[in-house]
Amino acid sequence: MPVLLSIAVSTPAHSTLGSLLSYESERVLSPGTLVRVPLGRREVLGVVWGLADEPPPGVKPVSSVLEGVPPLTAAWRSGIEFAAQYYQRGLGEVALAALPPQLKDLSAEQLARRLKRQRTETPECNFDATNLVATNAEQTLAIGQIDTHPGPHLLFGVTGSGKTEVYLQAVARMLARNPQGQALVMVPEINLTPQLINRFTERFGAEQVVSMHSGMTPPQRLQSWLAAHSGAARMVLATRLGVFASIPHLKLILVDEEHDPSYKAQDGARYSARDLAVMRGKIEGATVVLGSATPSLETWNAVLQGRYQRIDLPERIGAGALPTVRRLDMNQQPPKSVIAPLLLAAIAERVARGEQSLLLLNRRGYAPVLACHACDWKSDCPHCSAYRVFHKIDRSLRCHHCGHAEPVPRACPQCGNLDISPVGRGTEKLEEHVAELLAQTKRPDGSAVRVARIDADSTRAAGELERQLAMVHGQEVDVLVGTQMVAKGHDFRHITLVAAINPDGALFSSDFRAPERLFSLLMQAGGRAGRNALMSEKSEMWVQSFYPQHPLFAALKAHDYPAFAAQQLKERQAAGMPPYSHQALVRADSRNQQAAQDYLQAVLEAALLVPGHEYITIYPPVPHPVARVANVERAQMLLESPSRKALQRFLSDWRAHLHALRDKSILRWAIDVDPLSI
Ligand SMILES: [Zn+2]
Ligand SMILES: [Zn+2]
């Protein structure tokens, strides 16, 4: 008598099929077992979820079992169930997306061959012996706290306060205590944090550590996954996708730079890996540590409410004081100055002393728009409701939304005027401008100043970022112009001046999280300066602003994150914004903006049929801030509730209406729970 199993498979998005399907099996397979099953004309990977009761008509048998791969644990399955439910996605979709792609593609024989090569034994390592690095009093206290208190913890410490050493020793203690224990270490972007990976492999040995990130090849991903799944790898260093990794003996989860927006997925199940890490810790009984100098306001609020434990690391180790913050009132500067004379003089002084400066501007390209002054032509993108950005380096107009690129026209395409000119300023133009302004400045050896730029454009080719960073480290650059990309993670020893060229935009942005992101970026960027103990006394952070008295800059000057957070939380509370309310965004894409909005209007009306709708505020459908991208019109609708539970319950009931009301004019729709940008 065959048994009937309920198996999670990845069904096409928005299909009417549920993602738990029933199959027959000759033998009982324990939940978590990986199998291949027929789906339509294909054979797909599935995860046994449990027993099914009612055999559907025409039930098919399981094709094969992936022998040699132990079943996924109950805790892993609970985590997947939670994520699917919370982010309003199919269970099978989330479960299967969490598995390495090769597991789905390899044949049974290929997989058997891979498994044979796979290491399953944990190499010997004396984790007590790794504990020998001296720590200061705060670090010792922090390590003890993590070791003895279940958390979740917020490890609150400025750049350079020795968070990494706390991470390393907390892991070492856990490993020493648990002969099988495993740790998950999460980082925002693997390319930007090679130093952290090096610290772990140097301390524990490369064979103890595997990494997981989207830059790896499918065979590498499978290998890492199997090493973690078999328990052979004791540490998993991963970007956000690692939060779903199978780590059967997970005891400790560290989330470095927990405030970083890249922990939130921007497509598919739009999950927050930071929030899921906290939930996973709860399910697995693992200690969770969130680390940051500028925690997200959600995390800070959880600390204030006593839900998370705060651990302070106030001191900067081996690098004396934090940089002095100097606010430059741009109202007092000569008209049209891009860099105030005082700041320019400070940069020139540093060049002459052989020190480096970092100038931050969060806009790449030469100019954000090219315009004709004879008529009203501007460099619109033909496919998007956005301007194409002028890139002088290859004389192109490029759309940063859809990628559409064209050579710059010789004359205005509308009136033929030859005098079309760039408006505004990006990193390319700033780089050019700075080089002109400093043309007479000499380095200590009498040679000319060297200005360089690091942004998404300059580092597109493989290996370019590493090469350019090496040039900065090797002091082959005197003035570095860059976007937020350079503000994260890098340990620049010779930078003694950091300047924010034009940070005002974020102060008055329609995005309520913009000030939070700006504060964190500037704190982090300031942390780049003066990491060399010998130079720190004269390290400075300059902020050019037309609103120098703004509370954000005042808090920055005092290096006072708690003051900044208090002011922001007060504003958020008054406005009923997160973390004092909970939000979800419904997005709809169509060829036609009206159709997208009509669909949202229809589902809005259907909301009145859903029990509990009275606890939810639904705002009317509006176009997305960039309404058209690559000829697709985008509309969205915001939902808000003071109760997370009420919002969750409502969304899961309402989803059926979103399915039912969709017609051919809607290309896709999605629910974004806890959206980061609106
Ligand atoms: Zn014109
Ligand atoms: Zn475009």
Image (cartoon, grey):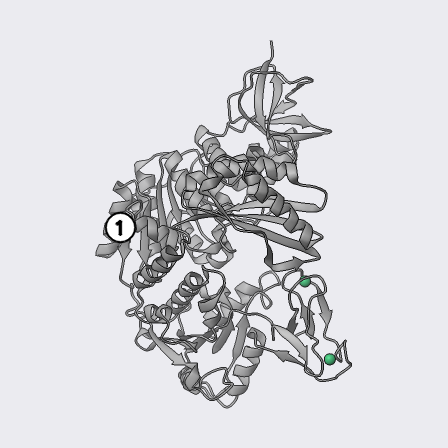
x and y, in percent, of residue 520 in the image: 40, 62
Q: Nearer the viewer, residue 658 or 280?
A: 658
162 versus 33 height, above or below:
below
Identify the residue shown where x is 62% and y is 16%: 55
x and y, in percent, of residue 419 in the image: 71, 84
Q: Nearer the viewer, residue 215 or 577?
A: 577
x and y, in percent, of residue 280 in the image: 42, 38
Q: Quadrant of residue 574?
A: bottom left
Callout 1: helix, strand or loop? helix
309 versus 88 height, above or below:
below
Q: Is residue 119 at least partly visible in the picture?
A: no
Q: Residue furthest left?
A: 137
In the shown orientation, is residue 405 left or right of residue 576?
right
x and y, in percent, of residue 185 in the image: 42, 47
Amino acid beneath label 1: Ala
Q: Is residue 20 at least partly visible in the picture?
A: yes
Pointer 1: what residue?
Answer: 142
Identify the residue shown where x is 46% and y is 41%: 614
The quarter of the rendered structure image containing the N terminus is: top right
| Number of numbered markers | 1
| Quadrant of ligand 2 in image | bottom right
